[in-house]
Amino acid sequence: MKVTIDPVTRIEGHLKVEVNIEDNIIKEAKCSADMYRGIEKALKGYDYLTAIQITQRTCGCCPYAQAEAAALAIENALGIELNKNGKLLRNMVIGAYKLKDYILHFYTLSSLDFINLNAILEYKGDDFKMIEFKKYVLSELSSKRVFPNPLFTQTYKKAYISSTNKNIFLIKSYLDSFEIIKQVSEMVKIFGAKSPHMTTIEAGGITTRPTADKLIKYINLAKDVKDFIHNHYFNDVLAVAKEFKEYFHIGKGVNNFLTFDTLLNLDDTYMFVGGFSKDYKFSLGIEPYEIVEYNDYAYYKEAGGYKPLELDNLTPIDFDEFKTNEKKYSWSKAPRYKGEVVEVGPAAIVINTYLSNKNPKLNKLVDKVNKELNITIEDYNSVMGRHLARAIISCLIIDKLLEDALNVDEGVLGFIQLPKVPSNVKGIGLTEATRGALAHFIDIGENGFINNYEMVVPTTWNISPKDNKDIPGALEEMLRGTYVKDEKNPIEIARIIRSIDPCLACAVH
Amino acid sequence: MDRREFLELTNKVLFTIFGTSFSMSELEAMENSNNKPDLIWIHSMSCDGCSTSFLGAELPFIDILSRFVNIVFHPTFMASDGENAMKILDNYESDNLIVVVEGALANKNMPHVCMMGERFVNDIVKDVAKKSNLIIAAGTCATFMGICDMKGMYTNATSLKYFLKDENIEKPLINLPTCPMKPNHLLYSIFYYIKHNKVPPLDLNLRPLRFFGNTVHERCIYYNDYQEKIFAKEIGDRGCLFKLGCQGPVTKCDCVKSNADYDKYNCIVNGHPCIGCASENFPRTILFKRSDDDREIEKYKDFKRI
């Protein structure tokens, strides 16, 4: 039986997932990215610094990472190193944005797959927000309109947490999370100017001068956010994990994980380390030109496998070919690292950093959680493992942001003047976005104008179609073999898809 | 916060956005009205930035909006997905419908670059636009194509205004550029419509005059420095950012002018020259440069499709 979910809502962008189910087991899955703009190759002929502003506009959910990767690529090409404040302030902008994404993902986007919102009708307390929400749900349910507000009309039946108390507890956090997202957003704006699409991230640092009032405001907000993350977000994820223990075994993908260095410490080490692990054996370091992107199943005329910057043109197929070509099914390319399908994202960060033993704080926290839930590091390769990984990372990041904010030298600009316009240089920028490993490659030609640009984006790794050897992508692999209890009610599929937090606008760019 | 406080806050927010006040009884009547407008939000060739911006706004814009408007369809927030979601779009009947479109529209020769629910998003926009009473183009992409229309692109995306004209759909349209769209601009447009049942005063590009009447430059905190010819030579210097590539003089928006509480952060105050994200010509070939860099800042846009 063929089941199609299109559109997959509560993710970023246009994703279609089609699965073939036989005897309740998924035999094959196909993920199609449905929107194309062609930004990377369109950068040709634009000034090298525009890459920072334009590439971040590929995505409204993780723009900070695109901006950072582009800035790193340019700094790499020009051979610039940031000053102390530049490093700290950049962490403070991108770190805050990461937190916003993680909270948004768990509550706004994913929690409706676990919480039963109707439990609010049993609420007996006196919290204003909860009472208002209860009234709202009541009036919607009794409105007799054909469609009550679909924001709260859950699609799937009998798949949610059954305990009323737990539901109410989580609904309260769900409502509170909107408030926290606003606060984290403000943290981003203090030094980033706008959220999303921060202008102040530039090659050379952050253009905002860190005055005392700004720092105090940032620290005050960060303290509230820290309280929410440690006491609510982390515990909520644990509570959901305990309810849905079987989800530590559902959505298991390939055993290859790729991460890049991210969040620089002042001693030039990184908080989360880059590397590649295969079957839980970790090797430090990355060879960026080992990445190859395959287009056989993607809607492009150039159908081979290409290394970064190898192609300077990428032609979309026209409408007539689209109607007749049965083979191609996605706008997303299929990147492979050393020929392997890899998973990127929070689970990869936790697994790789844990295996590398470079961050004792992370290992300690992971060990504690593993003991409490009775799981191992290998179980992070699952639906619940990915949610848990986000919560663990968030706890560590918020602590680091507070530390960094206290280290900033007040009043000293975290920006260094760029050297004269460069010609004929190349650079690579590697970092971690919310959804995983992100690489930018820049080739600057005459007079500072871009010759060629390449973005290898996290969601492209995760939702990639088959490559030229017909090997399915990471999400397709996670879905394959999954047991679907009720084919008409395939909540397992929805949960697996949302666990990797796909971001389609990025993936295709 | 109780209900009374909430309404007072709403009143205050609307006051700072509108300049005129709603009375409490008016707000209460609007909240309890049986004829609240319905809102359908469609993502075309978008990055979700406008939705994210709306959700992350410092004031409870989304709470305010959700009490005075029924949000019927929004791909990022809605609980239902797949077929159930598409059914809402197809069957929703409303005599008071507002449609918000985020992102540029695909060219009619290449509709396959943007699809949802196994249909072309262009067709979906066409269908809901016909049923609607007011259409809002959210963000620079929907208004002027923004980054969906750069020099080397194959897609030839079009703006919402051009698309509607091409499809012969004559409905009131409000353009709200800036990348991402500012939440208060959307709130203003919707509340103006609820109160007066028509669009607010607009300029030739259909942007609300209240926000897009002046250039960023004309209301800039460094306007005096510009007049006195005090120019910053590098980031961090005192003075006007014009020589660093600032596009304030050619960009109409209320960024620096508005110092309301929810809108106090902006690029220029944070030390970065304006990159012109609200302008017709965004993105230009150079957005930020050294003051001694004399390369010309060029523009590229095919105004036939705006």
Image (cartoon, coloured by chain):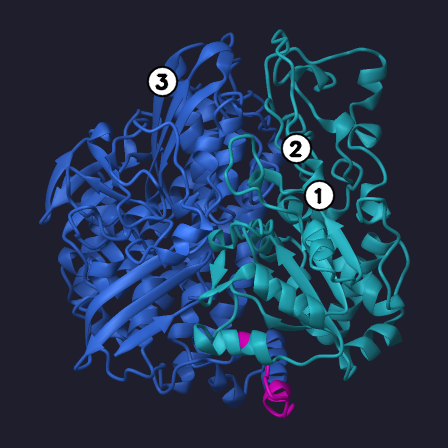
Q: Which comes sooner in the sequence, label 1 or label 2?
A: 2
Question: What amino acid type should be assigned to the residue bearing mark 2?
Answer: Lys
Instruction: Say which chain is cyan.
Output: B
Question: What amino acid type should be assigned to the residue bearing mark 3?
Answer: Lys
Between residues B175 and B110, which one lies in front from this camera angle?
A: B110
Q: Is residue A503 visible?
A: no
Mark 2: which secondary structure?
A: loop
Residue A302 in the image, given as x and y percentages of width and height: 32, 38
Q: Is residue B49 above or below residue B187?
A: above
Mark 1: which secondary structure?
A: loop
Do tags 2 and 3 sit on the same chain?
no
Between residues B205 and A290, which one lies in front from this camera angle?
A: B205
Pointer 2 residue: B301
> Residue at left 65%, top 21%?
B298
The region drawn magenta spans A138-151
Question: What amino acid type should be assigned to the residue bearing mark 1?
Answer: Ile
Q: Is residue B102 above or below residue A52?
A: below
Q: Are marks 1 and 2 in contact (CB under 8 Å)?
A: yes
In which quadrant of the rendered image does the C terminus of chain A lie? top left
**The color chain A is rendered in:** blue
Pointer 1 residue: B306
Do tags 1 and 2 sit on the same chain?
yes
Residue A90 in the image, given as x and y percentages of width and height: 46, 32
Quarter location, residue B285: top right
Pointer 3 residue: A426
Left or right: A142, with A246 as reference point: right
3D distance between C-alphas at marks 1 and 2: 9 Å
